[in-house]
Amino acid sequence: MAEHTVKSFDGEIGQLRGLIAEMGGLAEVGIADAIRALVTHDEELAKKVVEADHRIDALEAEVDRLAVRTIALRAPMADDLRDVIAALKISGVIERIGDYAKNIAKRVGSIERQSRFEPLTLIPAMGDIAQGMVHDVLDAYAARDAQAATEIIKRDDKVDNFYDSIFRNLVAHMMENPATISSAAQLLFVARNLERIGDHATNVAEMVYFAATGLYHAGREALADGVGGPA
């Protein structure tokens, strides 16, 4: 490519990365605020999380337009094409993470203020791990760090373990306290959304690994061991 074309392409890649960073930052804040609203029963904060999700949706649409335009006009190859495709896919995953944060926020008003279940004390810790995975995978994307991506994938087990513990606690609580079934069911929904956020952060890590190495993987265990095949 001519020098001005290369500079234009680099500018577009930088713009895509900037949009992804903005999306990710909003998603991180959404997760933290949704959990805080849940614990403090702050319905106003919960509404702000729901409203903020519109900005994430708008940014995803902007990434889609720029990525398609870049592919059509620049016809990128190899590493460059992987960068564009990764941005396109990652934006879709972050949009879903934002949706999960919004879904958690929507449950705040449905959980009784006086309900102090043991699982509610576990959910903030689970949220911290899920939010940390999102934060770190965005750093890995910015640095194109395949090793960091593999470490993030391993951390998803912690989120799954929290979900299993919360599920068992909630089921036991509902059996012993039938009057709280409605609120307990809402908390189970919250835990499930956090578990899905962990899964989606893992999906982003897999895309980061591909963008950085050009290798696919044969499952999470294989990726964690650095095993893959050619793109």
Image (tube, helix red, strand yellow):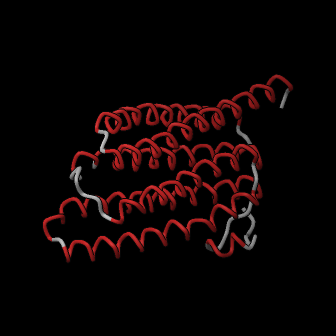
Residue at left offset 35%, top offset 72%: 167
Quarter containing the C terminus: bottom right
- The residue lying toward the viewer, choosing from 88 and 55, is 55
In the figure, residue 158 lies in which quadrant? Answer: bottom right
Tell me residue 224's x, y (percent): 70, 70
Q: Residue furthest top?
A: 4
Horizontal arrangement in the rendering, residue 81 relative to residue 200 (left or right)? right
- In percent of the image, x 56 and y 41: which residue is there? 24
Residue 133 in the image: state x and y as whole percent: 59, 55
Taking the image as shown, residue 63 lies to the left or right of residue 127, namely right
Q: Quadrant of residue 48?
A: top left
The reply, left or right, for residue 140 in relation to residue 166 is: right
Residue 153: where, in percent of width, then height? 62, 64
Quarter of the image that includes the N terminus: top right
Residue at position x 64%, y 55% from top? 207
Q: Is residue 109 above or below residue 223?
A: above
Name the spot of residue 143 as percent of width and height, x first.
Answer: 76, 46
